[in-house]
Image: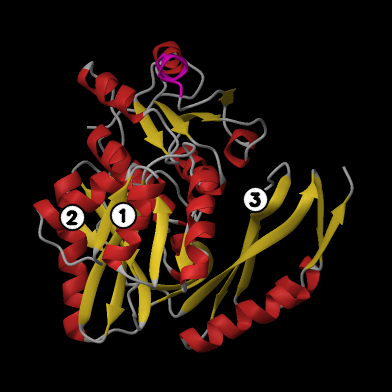
Amino acid sequence: MLRIGSPLTTVSKKALLLGSGELGKEIAIELQRFGVEVIAADRYSNAPAMQIAHRFHVLDMLDPVALRSLIETEKPDYIIPEVEAIATPELLKLEKEGYNVIPTAKATFLTMNREGIRRLAAEELGLPTAPYRFADDHDSFLAAVEEIGIPCVVKPIMSSSGHGQSLVKTRDDVEKAWKISQEGGRAGAGRVIVEGFIRFDYEITMLTVRHRDGTTTLEPIGHHQVDGDYRESWQPQAMSEVAIEKARNIARTITGALGGWGIFGVEMFVCGDDVLFSEVSPRPHDTGMVTMISQDLSEFALHARAVLGLPIPEIRLFGPSASKAIVVEGDTDKVVFSGLEDILAMKGVQIRLFGKPEVRGHRRYGVILATADSVENARAKAEEAYSKLKVEILPR
């Protein structure tokens, strides 16, 4: 039986968020609904989750000494990774010492590194994937491109949200792709994966929650990406019965191998009735932000319940829904939004502004959510709402 004491007392339940972005902020909110004491950590100050946590820490989470010091100081009941850039080998050690890593340290370790999760999926579990090769240096990268063929996709093995990722369409793109992969990875330059380009009909995220009563797959989420970074998602994505059953089986298989409790975002490519595994995140997924309007329990609420070992007897889909990311471009610590009155005057529309402190280049600053009588109308409504938003980029 779960016992939760009041936050900031000696009997509180403490959750440490490793990563404090917009997804971590929503996790913090849901945990706090149950009276959990939330500690937020990230590499920079004033990250979204830090703004609502009981307290926060700024550190390089790739530094194993700093990470261990934080955890030994806070002694959290739950360690919840929210980003990939973490010293995961240290989490493996800490888990063996008795700390509770969500969903497991193994899951966090394997999914931070594209090589680990791809080898698990394709070579151990036999799941269908795109052809792939790994490369450690420029020469082996060129050999991998030759072997896989053009077009192909190049990604650092340690990155997320499209960082360092590029599509090689012609031979003129090869050198540029190598440079992008070495400059854009979350853990710096190094090993890359070269994947065959899949000509798919659409991509989906199958949110899958492992909880005390079993494993539940949600309605599939379709999404649109730009350079590997989410821009738009919708739920439910229409699929054939054959394809959706294949997707559910893939999701159950990979999450079962990773183990633990919590929500997983399983990404797949779909072409007709064929489904290929792409990636998995052992945490709420950015494309799943649509669930903040589409379901009675969002992916964040489900994650909180699963982490705490609470029941999930039912998940109700309200209806066709869509999300559209608010992306800001520039170099400033002063971003001002207006037009919210016009947006919120629309029926079935909501908006979330994340409160990020600055942008250098481009950055996701919020999301517009919409629901309608069809996915097409929900997407159109989100687009219309987005057109009403005014963004001011002021100088530093």
Which residue type carries mark 2?
Ala
Give yes or no for contact between labels 1 and 2 (Cβ–Cβ under 8 Å). Answer: yes
Point out residue 120 in the picture as x, y percentages from the top left corner: 17, 49
**Residue 226's x, y, as percent?**
54, 68
Q: What residue is at 47 percent from the left and 44 percent from the top?
A: 27
User: Which marked residue is nearer to the observer: mark 3 or mark 2?
Assistant: 2
Q: Where is residue 211 in the image (x, y as percent from the top left)?
A: 22, 48
Q: Name the residue under label 2.
A: 121
Give the left or right position of residue 18, taking residue 130 as reference: right
Q: Is residue 26 left or right of residue 136?
A: right
Q: What stretch is highlighted in magenta?
A: 63-68
Left or right: 270 with respect to 161? left
Where disc 3 sits, the SS reads loop
**Distance between the Cα atoms at labels 3 and 2?**
34 Å
Task: Please indicate, yes or no, whether residue 202 appears anywhere in the rendered image.
Answer: yes
Magenta-colored segment: predominant secondary structure: helix
Between discs 3 and 1, the one toward the N terminus: 1
Could you say where residue 182 lies in the image, as x and y percent from the top left?
Answer: 50, 45
Disc with the residue nearer the chain's start (3 vs 2): 2
Residue 278 included in the magenta stretch of the image: no
Q: Nearer the viewer, residue 198 or 333?
A: 198
Q: In this view, does 192 lie above or below 174?
A: above
Give the label, 1 or 2, closer to the camera: 2
Find disc 1 in the rendering and name its residue: 280
Question: What residue is shown at x 67% (from left), y 34% (from top)?
Answer: 46
The quadrant of the rendering that contains the C terminus is top right
In the rendered structure, find residue 354 and report the number of the disc placed on it: 3
Question: Circle 2 — which element?
Answer: helix
Q: In this view, does 212 lie above or below 348?
A: above
Q: Residue at x 58, y 25 (%)?
A: 56
Real-space Cα separation, disc 1 to disc 2, in angstroms: 10 Å
